[in-house]
């Protein structure tokens, strides 16, 4: 992911700009495609947040990047700030959002992919895996890592 997003600026919870190539180096990255206007997204986001917080306790190398399908910058920031975890997002209007949607064939949201640094998909449907197996975060993490390496 660090290679795929090299040169892209991410934002964190504090609103700071982060160079994605540097920030994501050495991390296992989940791309989270979602939007505030999407009811299924709003139902899944708290589950992802809990899962993320549990994994972060023992695996700080896990990072989520929110790829918004919101129609306005204010909606993206509000949704991120009020509902999401301590991860990062690609700012509204960045052309990389459309590239990622196309590259990963995201037709519906919410959707989540676990990606290698070069952009290869490790887990195609991480959303369903978190919903179905997320009650045991450590076990699911180990399953993902088995495919990651």
Image (spheres, rainbow, N blue to C red):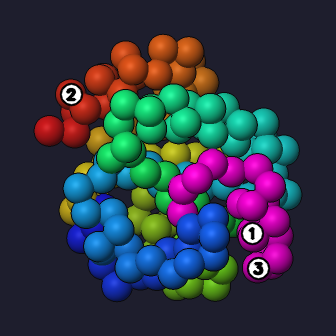
User: Tag 3: Cα neighbours inside 10 Å, few (<14), some, or many (≥20)?
Assistant: few
Q: Are marks 1 and 2 in contact (CB under 8 Å)?
A: no
Q: Which residues are magenta?
A: 71-88
- Spot occupied by residue 129 in the image (x, y as percentages of width and height): 50, 26
Q: CA distance from mark 3 to mark 1?
A: 5 Å
- Spot occupied by residue 147 in the image (x, y as percentages of width and height): 22, 33
- Spot occupied by residue 22 in the image (x, y as percentages of width and height): 29, 73
Q: Is residue 68 above or below residue 95?
A: above
Q: Residue at x 84, y 44 (%)?
A: 39
> In the picture provided, is 130 more to the left or to the right than 114?
right
Q: Secondary structure at mark 2?
A: helix
Q: Are marks 2 and 3 in contact (CB under 8 Å)?
A: no
The reply to whether residue 32 is in sight is yes
Q: CA distance from mark 2 to mark 3?
A: 37 Å
- Residue 81: say if magenta: yes
Tell me the residue that label 3 is attached to: 73
**Which image quadrant: the N terminus?**
bottom left
Q: Are marks 3 and 1 in contact (CB under 8 Å)?
A: yes
Q: Residue at x 76, y 50 (%)?
A: 83
Q: Please tell me which of labels 2 and 3 falls first in the chain.
A: 3
Q: Residue at x 39, y 20 (%)?
A: 138
Q: Is residue 51 above or below residue 88?
A: above
């Amino acid at each position: 992911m660090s290679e795929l997003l090299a040169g892209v600026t991410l934002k964190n919870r504090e609103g700071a700009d982060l160079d994605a190539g540097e920030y994501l180096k050495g991390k296992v990255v989940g791309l989270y495609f979602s939007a505030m206007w999407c009811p299924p997204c709003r139902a899944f986001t708290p589950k992802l947040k809990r899962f993320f917080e549990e994994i972060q306790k023992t695996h700080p190398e896990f990072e989520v990047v929110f790829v918004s399908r919101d129609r306005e910058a204010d909606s993206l920031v509000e949704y991120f700030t009020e509902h999401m975890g301590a991860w990062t997002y690609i700012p509204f209007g960045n052309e990389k959002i459309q590239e990622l949607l196309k590259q990963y064939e995201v037709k519906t949201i919410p959707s989540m992919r676990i990606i290698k640094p070069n952009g290869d998909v490790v887990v195609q449907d991480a959303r369903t895996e978190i919903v179905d197996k997320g009650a045991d975060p450590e076990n699911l993490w180990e399953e993902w890592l088995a495919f990651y390496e």
